[in-house]
């Protein structure tokens, strides 16, 4: 067992327990997201050299400074650790609008400064006045109005999402990080087919990527599969269907894995979204794939699309958003 020295307190880390689990079990308020080692929301820094597996995916200069991912770090010796400096929140954004997308998800529109640069599908970290930090994907491409849109689902006992839904007001200002992540569209292969698969509010990055690809006149086929258990949990259906009428290359399949009636037959696909997508396309050679949703679905589908021919370099995942229900409920 190792001892974690964090903010003038000592915490005993059990064998095979991660730094993140130890701190959360001790009710330490620490930023985190996907718990899969991809989103980097839980990045910390140590005086000692952290385990190599805790630095997978980090830049070389970050490794040299002993940055590590708390969700991947299972220390074998004591660590003196410190949080990322608050200067990481280098932007202050203003709330422009809040609009319900469905019964539990709202669109949060923020106004940013000219020096904020991003791509649709990347994510940012936001912080409440009492220092609760959460990550959300950007659901729109850059625009001349300097606006970004986020899809925020309110969850039971979710401290951050409840604050956004109930307490955050138009005109309020929030600290925000730089844009992070590599789940975004690039136009280096405009003829490549795009497969976009997501569940719940994992639609956010996919919707942004979709708009970006269309705006850049992507030539290959684009197929968006969005799934949920019930019809009321889906959203932006009308907006996406309108895009389908405008672009011959775009296809859209809303999927229901739960309650399904005869009235749904002509409007939805029946089944889990990844099953529907994989049964639709059995050969994914030279496809680019974007996966956003529940962590188990994403991990499972990453393997399956690879086995169906997609190159691993062409598979992109929105890591933190996919487990937002678990994240918030753990707050």
Image (cartoon, grey):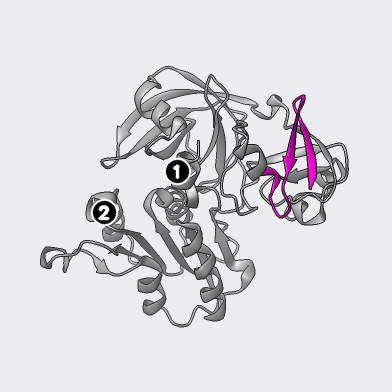
Q: CA distance from mark 2 to mark 1?
A: 16 Å
Residue 78 visible in the displayed image: yes
Does the magenta run of residues contain 14?
A: yes
- Give yes or no for contact between labels 2 and 1 (Cβ–Cβ under 8 Å): no
Determine which of the numbered discs, if any, sits on residue 45 in the image: none
In this picture, is 53 found above or below 261? above
Regarding mark 2 in the picture, which secondary structure is present there? helix
Residue 187 vs 139, above or below: the answer is: below
Q: Which residue is mark 2?
A: 242
State which quadrant residue 101 falls in: top left
- The magenta-colored residue range is 1-20
Write down the residue under mark 1: 140
x then y, percent, for residue 327? 50, 43
Q: Earlier in the sequence, mark 2 or mark 1?
A: 1
Q: Can residue 137 be seen in this snapshot?
A: no
Q: Residue shown at 49%/19% (left/top)?
A: 173
The residue that appears at 40% across and 32% down in the rendered structure is: 108
């Amino acid at each position: 067992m190792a001892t974690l020295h964090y903010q003038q307190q000592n915490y005993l880390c059990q064998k095979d327990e991660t730094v993140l689990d130890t701190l959360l079990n001790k009710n330490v308020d620490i930023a985190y997201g996907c718990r899969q080692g991809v989103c980097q929301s839980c990045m910390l820094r140590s005086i000692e050299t952290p385990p190599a597996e805790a630095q997978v995916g980090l830049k070389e200069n970050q490794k040299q400074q002993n940055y590590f991912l708390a969700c991947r770090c299972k220390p074998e010796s004591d660590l003196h650790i410190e949080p990322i400096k608050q200067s990481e929140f280098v932007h202050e954004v203003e709330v422009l609008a809040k609009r319900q997308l469905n019964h539990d998800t709202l669109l949060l529109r923020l106004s940013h400064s000219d020096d904020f640069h991003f791509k649709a599908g990347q994510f940012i970290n936001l912080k409440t006045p009492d220092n609760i930090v959460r990550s959300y994907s950007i659901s729109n491409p850059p625009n001349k109005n300097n606006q970004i849109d986020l899809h925020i689902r309110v969850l039971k006992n979710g401290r951050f999402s409840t604050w956004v839904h109930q307490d955050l007001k138009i005109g309020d200002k929030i600290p925000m990080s730089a844009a992070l992540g590599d789940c975004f569209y690039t136009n280096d292969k405009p003829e490549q087919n795009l497969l976009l698969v997501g569940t719940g509010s994992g639609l956010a990055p996919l919707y942004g990527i979709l708009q970006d690809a269309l705006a850049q006149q992507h030539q290959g086929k684009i197929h968006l599969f969005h799934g949920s258990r019930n019809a009321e949990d889906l959203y932006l259906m009308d907006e996406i269907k309108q895009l389908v009428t405008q672009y011959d290359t775009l296809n859209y399949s809303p999927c229901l894995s739960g309650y399904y009636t005869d009235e749904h037959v002509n409007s939805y696909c029946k089944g889990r979204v990844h099953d529907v997508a994989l049964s639709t396309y059995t050969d994914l050679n030279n496809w680019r794939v974007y996966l956003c949703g529940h962590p188990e679905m994403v991990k499972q589908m990453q393997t399956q699309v690879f086995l169906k021919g997609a190159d691993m370099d062409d598979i992109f995942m929105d890591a933190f958003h996919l487990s937002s229900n678990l994240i918030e409920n753990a707050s």
